[in-house]
Amino acid sequence: MYGHVEKLAEEIQKGAASVEGVEAKLWQVSETLSEEILGKMSAPPKSDVPVITPNDLAEADGFVFGFPTRFGMMSAQFKAFLDATGGLWRTQQLAGKPAGIFYSTGSQGGGQETTALTAITQLVHHGMIFVPIGYTFGAGMFEMEQVKGGSPYGAGTYAGDGSRMPSELELAQAFHQGKYIAGITKKLKGAA
């Protein structure tokens, strides 16, 4: 809504594209809130990133799904998108494809890990391979001197009241996640 997830997604895309032979595309899901509600929330206009359809997923070799957190879970907009993937589920077109997740929350107690844990169920039902970043980001995972979102599940940021944008460290973690998952996706595709 305020650009936090998009900012992380841009870095993930750059990280993925840094892997030779990998093409990374950026998409957004459809907005489900009315213009009236968005106006009351002081939401800026949506970016020009293309809106994805469920069938677009079938063309990809791997995914890194990002979403804001609402009450410790993915936003309703993203859940509505995933709910529309029943045809892909029925035919298991996403089975065996690697997928990672990243997120934005309003606060440190805002559900970064619960959002990841509840999102994994979506991947499991599709038969996707969940690819967490673990502690592969190295020393950045142990940063204690500054506020940093993210966890072994994936990159993340803290939005606060919406005015705090992702820090350089959070963006670096997002770049790492994109590069890491792209490398795994490339290996899996080459082994097939």
Image: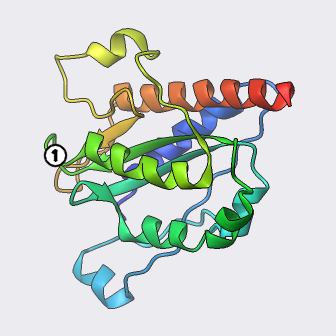
Q: In the image, what residue occupies the spot 69% across and 42% down?
A: 97
Name the secondary structure under disc 1: loop
Q: Amino acid at mark 1?
A: Ser
Query: Where does label 1 land, which residue?
Result: 107
Q: In the image, what residue occupies the spot 16% across and 46% down?
A: 107
Q: In the image, what residue occupies the spot 59% across and 24% down?
A: 180
Q: Position of residue 6 (x, y in %)?
A: 47, 52
Is 157 on the left or on the right of 87, as rendered? Answer: left
Q: Which quadrant of the structure image shows residue 71?
A: bottom left
Q: In the image, what residue occupies the spot 24% across and 54% down?
A: 72
Q: Is residue 19 above or below residue 5?
A: above
Q: Position of residue 3 (x, y in %)?
A: 40, 56
Is 63 on the left or on the right of 83, as rendered? Answer: right
Front residue of this view, candidates 118 and 15: 118
Alpha-carbon neighbours of circle 1 within 10 Å: few (<14), some, or many (≥20)? some
Q: Position of residue 126 (x, y in %)?
A: 60, 54
Q: Which of the image's four quarters has the C terminus?
A: top right
Q: Which of the image's four quarters has the N terminus?
A: bottom left
**Residue closest to the far top:** 139
Is 165 on the left or on the right of 85, as rendered? Answer: left
Q: Position of residue 30 (x, y in %)?
A: 52, 74
Front residue of this view, candidates 142 and 72: 72
